[in-house]
Image (cartoon, grey):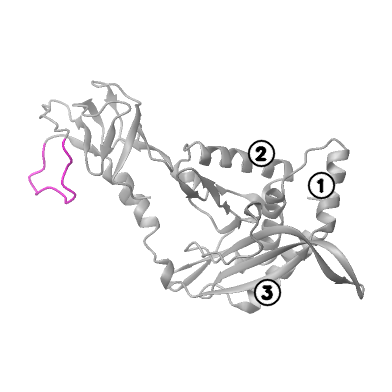
Amino acid sequence: MTPETCTLARWLKAEGASVVEGEPLVEIETGKVSVALEAPASGTLASIAAAEGDDVALGQTLALILAEGEAAPKVSRTRAPRKKPAPAAPRGEQVAVGQVWRVMAERLSRSWAEVPHFYLTREVNTRSLRSWRQEQRRSGGGVPSVSDILVWACATALVKHPRMNSSWNDGTIIVHPSVNIGLAVATDDGLMVPVVHGVERMSMEQITARRMEMVDLARSGKLRPEDVAGGTFSITNLGMYGVDAFDAIVNPPQAAILAVGRILDRVVALKGEPSVEPMMMLTLSVDHRAADGALAAPFLGTLASLLEQAPHP
């Protein structure tokens, strides 16, 4: 999230055009996200120093915004110093790549190593889940993926257990009014966690559509900062890689993350008799500062019950 270079995708204003503070000015891209850089001041765009498709360095000046009557000094294409300039500032308001990455770095300033985790594991019988999806397929209706059903089930359980939909912030627990679920997505450029906002207000059909949209944006490198911000709970699924169970790392300041293993036929006791059932392992990682086992265990129990019943959201 703090690369040394990025690519200038396109200018949204031409040199000589009037710009207004806060107006989108230029789009820059990394392998992870696409960012629209806003004008830091009002004036006239001048001295564009990078063209579309150019790789630009952290701190490099891309252009100047001149006040009325202000002359444009020369803008160097060399990398700018990382420290702020001396009090005698150069003419024009500099539009620099660095201001974007500083904001994004602040979001990740908390060290994962400082978070006191604990883990709860529960095995879930998905017979009902598989049957329900088969019925949906036979009826000609839309068939949500297991990921979609997990998003729905987590949102439903979080509404019933709101303390698990919280954040730890400098000694204060903040319970969020809306459920915003982050989904870990593997891309060619690494792991991304786009966020589906307001899941508790969505139908299964809406969840499926939004999840597909966010995954496509992640894999095409077109996620915006707001697409990866504001998550209150996360889900990571490695079942497609043949992983049975694993422990995931909580993404601060969220209170918890759910790790999902593959669905695998196992011999289990059912009504006192051995039975082969499709089973899935869920592991809940929890920030102990935001929630303890007495809060996390009932949440995991509700989640398991929702998945073990044929869902009708």
Q: Give the labeled residue for mark 2.
A: 209
> At numbered mark 1, what does the secondary structure look like: helix, strand or loop?
helix
Q: Between marks 1 and 3, how big is the CA–CA gap?
A: 27 Å
Above or below, comparing residue 112 to residue 51 in the picture = below
Tell me which residue sits at (72%, 46%) in the image: 145
Above or below, comparing residue 24 to residue 276 in the picture = above
Relative side of 138 to 100, left or right: right
Above or below, comparing residue 294 to residue 140 in the picture = below
Tell me the crowding category of disc 2: few under 14, some 14 to 19, or many 20 or more residues within 10 angstroms, Cα based.
Answer: few
Please tell me whether mark 2 or mark 1 is closer to you in this view: 1
Magenta-drawn stretch contains 87? yes
Earlier-in-chain disc, 1 versus 3: 1
Q: Give the labeled residue for mark 3.
A: 297
Tell me which residue sits at (66%, 71%) in the image: 121
Q: Give the labeled residue for mark 1.
A: 133
Earlier-in-chain disc, 2 versus 1: 1
Earlier-in-chain disc, 3 versus 2: 2
Check disc 2 and give the amino acid type. Ala
Q: Position of residue 178 (x, y in %)?
A: 60, 55
Q: Position of residue 60 (x, y in %)?
A: 21, 39
3 and 2 marks in contact (CB < 8 Å): no
Residue 72: image quadrant is top left
Residue 25 seen by the camera: no
Magenta stretch? 78-90
> Between residues 184 and 26, which one lies in front from this camera angle?
184
Q: Between marks 3 and 2, how big is the CA–CA gap?
A: 31 Å
> Between residues 203 and 283, which one lies in front from this camera angle?
283
Tell me which residue sits at (64%, 50%) in the image: 199
Check disc 3 and give the amino acid type. Ala
> At numbered mark 3, what does the secondary structure look like: helix, strand or loop?
helix
